[in-house]
Image (tube, helix red, strand yellow):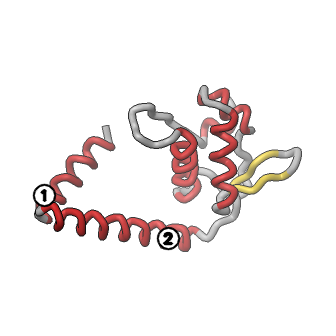
Amino acid sequence: MHDWEAAMEIIIRNTVNQPIYDQICSQLKAQIIAGKLSPGEALPSIRTLAKDLKVSVITTKRAYDELEAEGFLFTVAGKGCFVAEKNLDLIQEKQMKELEDHLTAALELSKSCGVSLEEVHEMLRILSKEEST
């Protein structure tokens, strides 16, 4: 077991319609936002993470590149990748805005399909139960 494994857990699911690099990226983001990975904390090398997750080095590199582009990670030549300092309030605000946009689109679609608000609530309850299993 590597030192970072105690703090970091990534689960790759082949059953979801989400690219593997995006699964890695979103799970690392969530752990950074939740404070499970602290600013300045070293992440596993691209090769180590690829080996441990049994995925391509290109996949892990793409995930790290995306996270770096979004300001979640920074790279120090010869030392590796580290969790960047972030303004968590700003990140959470962006996520809330994105959630509102998705919900607005879902409500507009439900109206055009003749789906009631109660039916949308029921769909959310069902989906939330499926996610937690």
In the rendered view, tell whether residue 130 sits above or below residue 124.
above
Percent across and percent down for residue 98 are 43, 67
Numbered disc 2: secondary structure: helix
Foreground residue among 6 and 23: 23
Residue, disc 2: 94
The quadrant in which residue 120 appears is: bottom left
Q: Which of 106 and 71 lies nearest the eye of the viewer? A: 106
Left or right, 1 with respect to 22, comes to right
**Amino acid under disc 1:** Glu
**Mark 1 residue element:** helix
Q: Which mark is residue 129?
A: none
**Lateral position of residue 29 relative to residue 57, left or right:** left
Q: Residues within 10 Å of mark 2 (few under 14, many from 20)?
A: few
Coordinates of residue 72 in the picture (x, y in percent):
65, 59
Residue type indicated by callout 2:
Lys
Q: Residue at x 63, y 28 (%)?
A: 52
Instruction: Give residue 119's mark.
Output: 1
Q: Residue 30 or 57: which is nearer the viewer? A: 57
Residue drawn at point x = 69 percent, y = 55 percent: 83
Task: Determine which quarter of the picture holds residue 53.
Answer: top right
Q: Earlier in the sequence, mark 2 or mark 1?
A: 2
Mark 1 neighbour class, 10 Å CA radius: few under 14, some 14 to 19, many 20 or more:
few
Q: Residue at x 58, y 55 (%)?
A: 32
Q: Quadrant of residue 39?
A: bottom right
